[in-house]
Amino acid sequence: MAVVETERHGQILVVRMNRPERLNALNLEMRTRLAETWTEFRRSNELEVAIFTGAGRAFCAGEDMKESLQRGQPGGTRPEIEDPFMTGALEKPVIAAVNGYAMGGGFMLVERTDLRVAAKGAVFEVSEAKRWLLGGYNHGHIANLPYPIAMEMALGFRFTAERFYEIGFLNRLAEPDNLMGSALAMAEHLLTLPPASRVNTVHMMRQMRPAPSSEQQRLAAALHEHGAKSDLIESRTAFAEKRTPNFKGWDKPEDRYRLPSIESVKG
């Protein structure tokens, strides 16, 4: 059984992650097959729009924790080939059809799409604060949200599809049995546009999306080093063993108060 399935509807390609027994967690095999699929889609002269979804009760649960623990290193193994969807090199529009859980790396996949439809009852989570030493910094849309909502997202609270629709993260809500129908309707609308208009407009809108400044990126890099690195693996071990994590926090208690600032990373 392929970990990524595809089907064609004329000029529309449906890309379906297919590890339902693992909530479509991203292991090396799936990352590699997705990179190959998006590369094939990009090069195709026949396919113009993609719909990205998952099999089973999840869109994608993010990092495959078991694979990370086997490697003894957090973050998952990246494929050897470039993934144009992940790098932003894909010129064609992608519509997310979120059928269930979209957590951590799965949430980030949804973020990279251009239009988003979610089944009622789907659940979203920005998980970095749970798995790394910093949450929320690389999610550009957070800059456009009211501060308490952005903080809630960054700290790993879960959001329902209904609430995300209210704050503008989703374009459509659909009944579960009409999720693909709703996504296909959006894709077919895109195909009514002149091809150059579709490509140019998507490209222009992507350039207008907010992104962290260079100073914020340097601060994020410094904050990723602020804390006990052993907690990265402990988070994943506790998740796999279904127990409460035993975090260390900092290698030295006084490190808690030595937070880097924007001023300290300038230049």
Image (tube, helix red, strand yellow):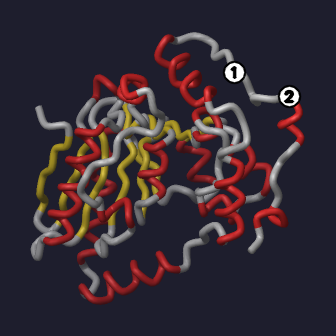
Please rate how many residues cluster around mark 2, counting C-alpha atoms within 10 Å: few if below 14, some from 14 to 19, many from 20.
few
Q: Is residue 159 left or right of residue 97?
A: right
Please rate how many residues cluster around mark 1, counting C-alpha atoms within 10 Å: few if below 14, some from 14 to 19, many from 20.
some
Is residue 34 visible in the rendered structure shown here?
Answer: yes
> Foreground: 142 or 215?
215
Residue type pointed to by label 1: Phe
**Disc number at residue 247?**
1
Task: Assess whether mark 2 and mark 1 are in contact (beta carbons under 8 angstroms).
Answer: no
Q: Which label's residue is closer to the chain start, 1 or 2?
A: 1
Q: Which residue is mark 2?
A: 253
Question: Residue 135, percent across and down?
Answer: 65, 45
Is residue 153 visible in the rendered structure shown here?
Answer: no
Q: Marks 1/2: CA distance?
A: 13 Å
**Disc number at residue 58?**
none
User: Which label sits in the foreground, 1 or 2?
Assistant: 2
Q: Is residue 48 above or below residue 229?
A: below
> Foreground: 225 or 244?
225
Give the position of the C terminus as an image quadrant: bottom right
Residue type pointed to by label 2: Pro
Q: Is residue 47 above or below residue 257?
A: below
Residue drawn at x 73%, y 42% is: 226
Residue drawn at x 28%, y 39% is: 28
Give the position of the N terminus as an image quadrant: top left
Residue drawn at x 72%, y 36% is: 227
Question: Residue 20, percent across and down?
Answer: 28, 28
Residue furthest to the front: 252
Residue drawn at x 21%, y 69% is: 42
- Tell me the element at label 2: helix
Question: Residue 241, percent across and down?
Answer: 49, 11
- Tell me the element at label 1: loop
Q: Is residue 35 left or right of residue 99?
A: left
